[in-house]
Amino acid sequence: MKKHWSELSTGRRCTVVVAGIAQLILQGVALRDIAKRTPAQVNGPKAGWVAASFINFFGPLAYFAMGRKKSD
């Protein structure tokens, strides 16, 4: 059943707000990292990782796990 914002408890509202803030921070850090790296330092196209970063939580986490080349 779909609930409206006004029907959520205070705890649920806080959870939604904290999760939203965490998503924005994670995406911002990922986008900043992508922008600072050269194409040679990224696995795959940078534009693809930028697009993937908009997939909630999964995109930025995938970039940090698989998108950055390890420095030797």
Image: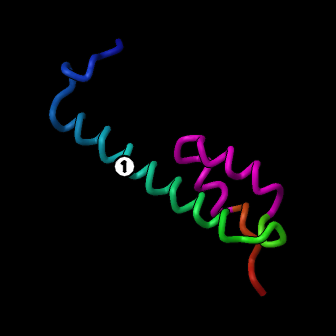
In which quarter of the view is residue 1 placed?
A: top left
Q: Write down the quadrant of residue 5 in the picture.
A: top left
The residue drawn where x is 19% and y is 19% is 7
Q: Position of residue 66 (x, y in %)?
A: 72, 61
Q: Is residue 28 above or below residue 15?
A: below
| Residue 41 percent coordinates (x, y) | 78, 72
Front in this rendered view, residue 37 or 66: 37
Query: For residue 25: magenta?
Result: no
Residue positioned 59% across, 43% down in the render: 54
Q: Main secondary structure of the magenta part?
A: helix
Residue 54, compared with residue 28, is above or below; it is above
Label 1: few (<14), some (14–19) or many (≥20) C-alpha neighbours in 10 Å = few
> In the rendered view, would you say 56 is above or below 44?
above
Q: Which residues are magenta?
A: 43-65
| Quadrant for the C terminus in the image | bottom right
12, above or below 53, in the image: above
Residue closest to the far bottom:
72
Q: Position of residue 8 (x, y in %)?
A: 21, 25
**Disc 1, SS:** helix
The one nearer the camera, 38 or 26, is 38
Q: Hey, what amino acid is under mark 1?
A: Ile
**Rendering coords of residue 21 (x, y %):** 36, 49
Q: Is residue 48 magenta?
A: yes
The residue that label 1 is drawn on is 21
